[in-house]
Image (cartoon, rainbow, N blue to C red):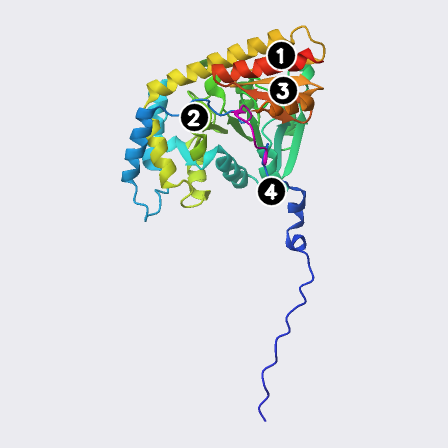
C-alpha cells in the first residue's frame, strides 16, 4: 500500500520582526543627522560647500553623460577617475601620487568600512576618540570589534595625548587607530610632528582621515599627502564631498602603500562606484584652477564667520567659540538646544551636537550675514 507523502507543517509565525535580527544590531540607530527637519532656507549643518558648480562645468558634465553606456556595469577599478584624481593632486596640491597608491570608493565612508573590516576580526581592538566622526566606532561595532573610545576634553581644546596613546596601543595590542585631522567636529588640527612620532612608534595600522585637511592654513606642511609612503602602517583618507563640492555623488579615496591599496581594491564590492559618479568626478577634477579659487573663498568665509561669532559672543558668559582649521565653526554653550531651535524658527539649519555644542558650516556671505543677524537677535533676549 502506497503511503502519501507527509504534509509539511508550517511553523507558527509568532515572532516579531525584531526577533529575527542579530542581537548586536539592536543597539544601532541609523546615521541621519537632522533627519526629517524641513522648512529651512539656509543649510549650515553638513559641512558642504556653499558653491554650486559653475555653468560652464555643468555643461561639460552634461556632455560627459554621453560617454556612459548605461546598460553596462561601471569600471570596477575606477581607473580613469583615479588617474584624474592623481592629475588633480599634481595640479592643485603639487603632490606626486601614483595611481597604484589610490583606491576609490563610494565616499570615504565606504572605504573606512572596508578598511576596518579588512584589518579587524571579532574581538580585535580599535582605538577611536570622542568627539570625532561617529562612524569609526559604528563600523567597529558592526563587526563586533572591541571599540575603545578615548574621551577628549574641551578644557584643553580637545587635544589628544598621542604619547600616552602610543603606550596604550602597544601595551593593549590595539590593531587599528583611526581619527580625523583636522577633526570633525572640533576643528582641531593635530601637528604633523606629533603624529609622525605616534605613527612610527605604534605596532598598529593608523588611519588618518584628512577629509578636512584642504581647509587647514598650513596644509602643505601638515598633511601626509606628500609622504605617506614613508609610513608602512599609514592610510590617508580623502574626499570630494567637502572642498571640491561634490557631496551629492559620493566619491572618496584611500591613499596608502600598494599592499594596503590593493587590499582595499580586493575586498570592496565589484562595482562599488557607479558610472555616473565616476564620470562627473573625472570631469570636475579637470578644472583645478576653479576648484582652488572656490576653496580659497570657503576658507576666507570661514575666517570671517569665526571672527564675527567671536565678536558676537566675546563678552557673553557661557559661550566659547573654538578656533577651527576646517570649513565650520564650533560653539560651546549650555544654550545650544535653545539656539538651534531659534535659528530653525528663522529658517536656518545648523548642527546641534550632544546638547552642548553647535557646529556651524561657513556659508556664503549672505548666509553668514543672516546667521549673525539672527544670533544677534537671540542674544538681545537673553
Are dots 4 and 1 in contact, CB under 8 Å? no
Q: Callout 2: helix, strand or loop?
A: loop
Nearest the viewer among 49 and 377 is 377
Residue pointed to by mark 2: 245
Closer mark to the observer between disc 2 and disc 3: 2
What whole-number distance in Å separates the C-alpha atoms at marks 1 and 2? 30 Å
For marks 4 and 2, the one nearer the N-term is 4
For residue 239, what is the image quadrant? Answer: top left
What residue sits right under mark 3 in the picture? 160
**Real-space Cα separation, disc 4 to disc 3, in angstroms:** 25 Å
Q: Is residue 114 left or right of residue 64?
A: right
Does residue 43 show up magenta in the picture?
yes
Disc nearer the start of the sequence (4/1):
4
Taking 295 as reference, is 22 above or below it?
below
| Labelled disc at residue 142 | 4
Q: Is residue 292 magenta?
A: no
Amino acid at each position: 500500500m502506497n503511503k502519501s507523502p507527509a504534509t509539511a507543517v508550517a511553523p507558527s509565525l509568532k515572532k516579531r520582526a525584531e526577533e529575527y535580527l542579530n542581537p548586536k544590531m539592536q543597539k544601532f540607530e541609523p546615521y541621519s543627522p537632522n533627519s526629517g527637519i524641513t522648512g529651512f532656507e539656509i543649510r549650515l549643518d553638513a559641512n558642504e560647500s556653499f558653491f554650486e558648480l559653475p555653468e560652464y562645468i555643468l555643461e561639460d558634465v552634461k556632455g560627459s553623460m554621453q560617454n556612459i553606456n548605461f546598460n553596462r556595469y561601471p569600471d570596477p577599478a575606477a581607473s580613469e577617475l583615479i588617474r584624474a584624481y592623481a592629475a588633480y593632486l599634481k595640479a592643485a596640491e603639487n603632490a606626486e601620487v601614483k595611481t597604484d597608491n589610490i583606491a576609490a570608493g563610494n565616499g570615504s565612508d565606504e572605504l573606512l568600512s572596508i578598511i576596518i573590516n579588512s584589518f579587524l576580526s571579532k574581538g580585535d581592538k580599535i582605538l577611536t576618540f570622542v568627539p570625532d566622526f561617529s562612524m569609526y566606532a559604528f563600523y567597529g561595532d558592526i563587526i563586533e570589534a572591541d571599540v575603545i573610545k578615548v574621551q577628549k576634553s574641551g578644557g584643553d581644546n580637545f587635544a589628544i595625548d598621542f604619547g600616552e596613546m602610543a603606550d596604550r596601543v602597544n601595551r593593549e595590542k590595539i590593531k587599528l587607530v583611526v581619527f580625523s585631522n583636522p577633526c570633525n567636529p572640533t576643528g582641531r588640527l593635530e601637528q604633523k610632528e606629533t603624529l609622525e612620532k605616534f605613527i612610527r612608534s605604534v605596532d598598529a595600522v593608523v588611519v588618518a582621515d584628512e577629509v578636512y585637511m584642504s581647509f587647514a592654513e598650513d596644509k602643505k606642511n601638515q598633511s601626509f599627502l606628500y609622504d605617506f609612503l614613508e609610513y608602512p602602517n599609514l592610510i590617508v583618507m580623502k574626499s570630494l564631498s567637502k572642498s571640491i563640492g561634490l557631496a551629492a555623488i559620493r566619491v572618496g579615496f584611500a591613499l596608502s602603500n600598494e599592499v594596503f591599496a590593493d587590499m582595499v581594491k580586493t575586498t570592496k564590492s565589484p562595482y562599488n562606484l557607479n558610472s555616473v559618479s565616476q564620470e562627473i568626478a573625472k570631469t570636475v577634477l579637470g578644472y583645478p584652477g576653479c576648484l582652488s579659487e572656490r576653496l580659497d573663498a570657503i576658507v576666507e568665509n570661514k575666517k570671517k564667520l569665526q571672527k564675527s561669532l567671536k565678536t558676537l559672543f566675546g563678552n557673553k558668559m557661557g559661550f566659547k567659540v573654538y578656533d577651527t582649521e576646517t570649513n565650520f565653526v564650533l560653539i560651546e554653550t549650555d544654550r545650544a538646544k535653545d539656539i538651534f531651535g531659534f535659528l530653525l524658527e528663522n529658517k536656518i539649519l545648523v548642527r546641534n551636537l550632544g546638547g552642548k555644542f553647535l557646529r556651524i558650516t561657513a556659508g556664503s556671505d549672505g548666509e553668514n550675514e543672516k546667521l549673525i543677524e539672527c544670533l544677534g537677535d537671540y542674544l538681545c533676549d537673553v
